[in-house]
Amino acid sequence: MTHLSGTRVVVIGGSRGFGRGMVEALAAAGATVYALARHAGDLDQLKREVSGVQTSVADVSDPQLAARLLQELRPDILVLNAGAMPSMLPVPEQSWQQFSRNWDTDVRGTFEFGAEALRLPLKPGSVVMIVSSGAAIASSSPLVWSYGSAKRMQWFLANSFQEAANARGLGLRFAVLVPRLTDQTELGRASLAVFAAREGISEQAYLQRLHAGVPLTPEMVGQGVVSLLTDPAYQAGLAFGFSEQGRLKPLNIPAAAGR
């Protein structure tokens, strides 16, 4: 895939933050983009401000959504970006319902859509992109260990789905996008506020301690998605993060261990 003109893209969780950045970049690159999210107001604003984007209210935790949506739209590119707000409590202070919030949403959505992409299957050359998190590599605070474990499980699932696609000769690609913590999204700002307060420092100081370079923006993530899909330099590999300058880079950490 060297260009996106004429391709059909579905972005689950496409109305705000990184998801919106992806929708904007993909639409600008010539793709026909369908953005889904839970909140109609955010989707209405997206449709007004980004030309040609189709929107629909949907909840990724709906067990019927994956089969219905993939059967109807048959996307060339499926982006799984939807996720729940984590609890922000240390694990011993969480109930199981709080701990499993991201497992029930982020992980389940990845499982349902990835499995359905194989069962249907999507046509050869299609791409399923799963948006994980830097917390999947090294959670910077015990307040997000439950979140980090869920985002890491998405990575494991992507590896498993890719192996299954290869074994069946389906010609599908599964890829994992791993953005780092930033103050440019709602989730990032909420996380930084809690982490910084716990350590008694400013949010900016906490962020600078974690990451040098420029803050990661939705626009950078959107351009990274376009690069991952079209640039030959990124046509191999499972997981990709972002450099200190906000450019896409392959990650060499394996998706699964113990082999």
Image (cartoon, rainbow, N blue to C red):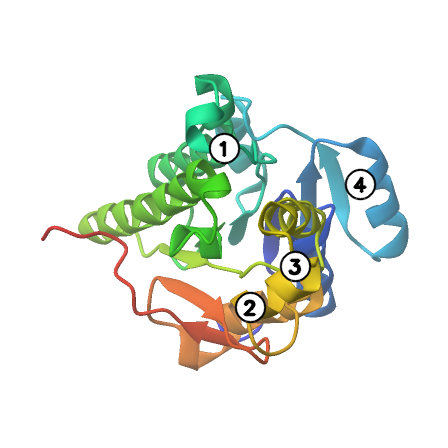
Q: Residue at x 68, y 48 (%)?
A: 193
Which residue position holds label 2?
Answer: 209
Real-space CA distance between mark 1 and mark 2, rounded to the nearest whole angstrom:
26 Å
Q: Which is in the foreground here, disc 1 or disc 4?
A: 1
Q: On the picture, is 136 further left or further right than 159?
A: right
Q: Is residue 122 above or below residue 67?
A: below
Q: State which tag comes first along the sequence, 1 or 4.
A: 4
Real-space CA distance between mark 3 and mark 4, rounded to the nearest whole angstrom:
14 Å
Given the image, on which type of amino acid does mark 1 rest? Asn
Q: Residue at x 72, y 62 (%)?
A: 27
Which residue position holds label 4?
Answer: 43
Q: State which tag comes first along the sequence, 1 or 3.
A: 3
Q: State which tag comes first along the sequence, 3 or 4.
A: 3
Q: State which tag comes first along the sequence, 2 or 3.
A: 3
Q: Which is in the foreground here, disc 1 or disc 3?
A: 1
Q: Are marks 1 and 3 in contact (CB under 8 Å)?
A: no
Real-space CA distance between mark 2 and mark 4, rounded to the nearest whole angstrom:
35 Å
Q: Is residue 217 visible?
A: yes
Residue 92: give x, y in percent of width and height.
Answer: 42, 26
Residue 229: give x, y in percent of width and height.
Answer: 50, 68
Which residue position holds label 1?
Answer: 102
For mark 1, give the secondary structure: helix
For mark 3, give the secondary structure: helix
Q: Which is in the foreground here, disc 1 or disc 2?
A: 2
Which residue position holds label 3?
Answer: 22
Most foreground residue, 131 or 10: 131
